[in-house]
Image: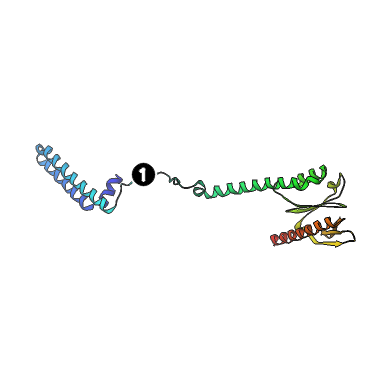
Amino acid sequence: MDSVRLWIKRHPLLAAVAGLFILVYVVSLASDPRNATNAILGYVLIFAIIWFIAWMVDRRKGYVADKRSMTVPARPAANMSLAAAHPAASTNKSQRRSSTNQGRSAIQSNQTYLAGLDNPTRIGIINMLQLDEAIQFVLKGENGTLVGTDRALLLIPPGRKGFEQRVSASYFNIDNVRIDPSRAGGHLRFDVGGQTHQIHLMNQDQLDRGLMAAQHIRQSVHDAHVTNE
């Protein structure tokens, strides 16, 4: 019925002519039923001509058959990637893949930094780190080891139980980072909650490494405060 209504809407004049012929056919059939066969053949021919005229008009106007009832959900084009068809899912997968790669890279790098430490200290640090937390430097001194990650600073006293007595703080809570020189080397000092902590650098090599570590700590402290503003 929808197709008939659409056809009548597009061709009202032809529909009126067809209706007129139907009315004439009904009247003639009622007056003389013997001519029914000839009348049917004539009207079939007339309706065929009307349909042909309507078809030609539709082609000129660019009409196509109404296929709304046959509509199916659009599928991505053959040359369109799944990432383009589903951007949100692709973004989430890319983020998870990136996070996984960062975690693996951090684990490999951390093992290299911790290679020179005793086993209890290495195990304690590994247990403390987040999965994607990366060690930035390891500075050995006379009174312990200073470990800087991308998130926090750890000062570990020497000895097998040194890790249990560690001092750890996020960069946001660290203040007044400096190096005080001494006759043979120097001291890298920093404050946490008003309390000063230090690592004693015995020689020039340790002092050079301490200078680089101090710069890294200052930059990390600055970045932490900027991020939290």
103 or 137: nearer the viewer:
137
At mark 1, the secondary structure is helix
Residue labelled with disc 1: 69
Q: Quadrant of residue 61?
A: bottom left
48 or 23: nearer the viewer:
48
Residue 160, percent from left and from top: 86, 44
15 or 88: nearer the viewer:
88
Lateral position of residue 63 relative to residue 181, left or right: left
**Quadrant the N terminus occupies:** top left
Relative to 38, residue 63 above or below: below
Residue 162, percent from left and from top: 86, 47
Task: Note whether residue 56 is visible.
Answer: yes
Q: Residue furthest right?
A: 183
Residue 173, percent from left and from top: 77, 58
The residue at the point 68 percent across, 47 percent down is 105
The residue at the point 26 percent across, 48 percent down is 7
Lateral position of residue 163 relative to residue 55, left or right: right
Q: Residue furthest front?
A: 204
Lateral position of residue 71 relative to residue 90, left or right: left
Residue 130, percent from left and from top: 72, 47
The residue at the point 86 percent across, 56 percent down is 203
Relative to 115, residue 191 above or below: below
* Within-10-Å neighbours for mark 1: few <14, some 14–19, many 20+: few
Lateral position of residue 30 relative to residue 173, left or right: left
Amino acid tagged 1:
Ser
Task: Note whether residue 130 is visible.
Answer: no
**Quadrant the C terminus occupies:** bottom right
